[in-house]
Amino acid sequence: QEKQVFTNDVKTVTMRDPNLRTPLHIACMNNADEETIKLLLDLDSSKETVMMLDSNGNSALHYLCENQSASESSVKMLLETEEIYLEKNPHETRLTNKTNKQGMTPLHLAVKIDADTEILTILMDETRINLKSFDERAVHELSKRVKGSANLQKCINRNLASRYS
């Protein structure tokens, strides 16, 4: 029944609370089900809510990546929606490279909470990620997490090679 509130007033999807969070931020913060996240993304015809930052500089992806039980498909949905937005706004920084006010990207947060390897793999896609914002400690933590994944190791190596060249 709560979902009908959004379908009756599409403008609700872009409204912000006092901390500048949209319904999408709040849904991701609370690890809402995939159907709810999809509904919120579908209602936003401009796809701008996926890129909006709250007062702490967090995107919905930041909140989702802070959640230990976040689903792989929810992360993919946000990134696919970002792609649609970036087609019309190519000057925007990718969500995976946006740092919040604490200097953390979504990948930093996912590593910090020991997220599933599948989520790290999605976030580290070489077309999306830039490890230049990672300090040495963060790179070390990330490298410990990816010991068993040759794909993630290759991605780190490519990113670090460009960082030091």
Image: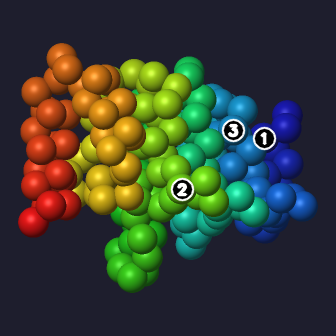
Going from the N terminus, do you reach mark 1 or mark 2 first?
A: 1
* Mark 1 or 2: the one toward you: 2
Q: Is mark 2 on a helix, strand or loop?
A: loop
Residue in the image at 52% along x and 26% along y: 113
**How crowded is the residue under tag 3: few (<14 C-alpha within 10 Å), some, or many (20+)?**
many
Image quarter of residue 156: top left
Residue 103 is marked as 2
Above or below, 30 against 86 in this view is: above
Going from the N terminus, do you reach mark 1 or mark 3 first?
A: 1
> As shown in the figure, which amino acid type bears the numbered disc 1?
Lys
Give whichever of 43, 23 is nearer the camera: 23
Image quarter of residue 100: bottom right
> As shown in the figure, which amino acid type bears the numbered disc 2?
Gly
Q: Position of residue 138 (x, y in %)?
A: 38, 40
Q: Position of residue 154 (x, y in %)?
A: 10, 39
**How crowded is the residue under tag 2: few (<14 C-alpha within 10 Å), some, or many (20+)?**
few
Residue 140 is marked as none
Report how far apart the C-alphas of labels 1 and 3 lie in the structure. 17 Å
Name the residue beneath numbered marker 3.
29
Q: Where is residue 109 in the image (x, y as percent from the top left)?
A: 51, 38
Above or below, 92 against 81 in this view is: below
Residue 3 is marked as 1
Report how far apart the C-alphas of labels 1 and 2 lie in the structure. 34 Å
- The N terminus sits in image quarter: top right
Residue in the image at 40% along x and 64% along y: 94
Does the CB distance between marks 1 and 2 fall below 8 Å? Answer: no
Report how far apart the C-alphas of labels 3 and 2 lie in the structure. 18 Å
- The C terminus sits in image quarter: bottom left
* Mark 3 or 2: the one toward you: 2
Residue in the image at 19% along x and 34% along y: 152
Query: Residue at the top extreme?
Result: 148
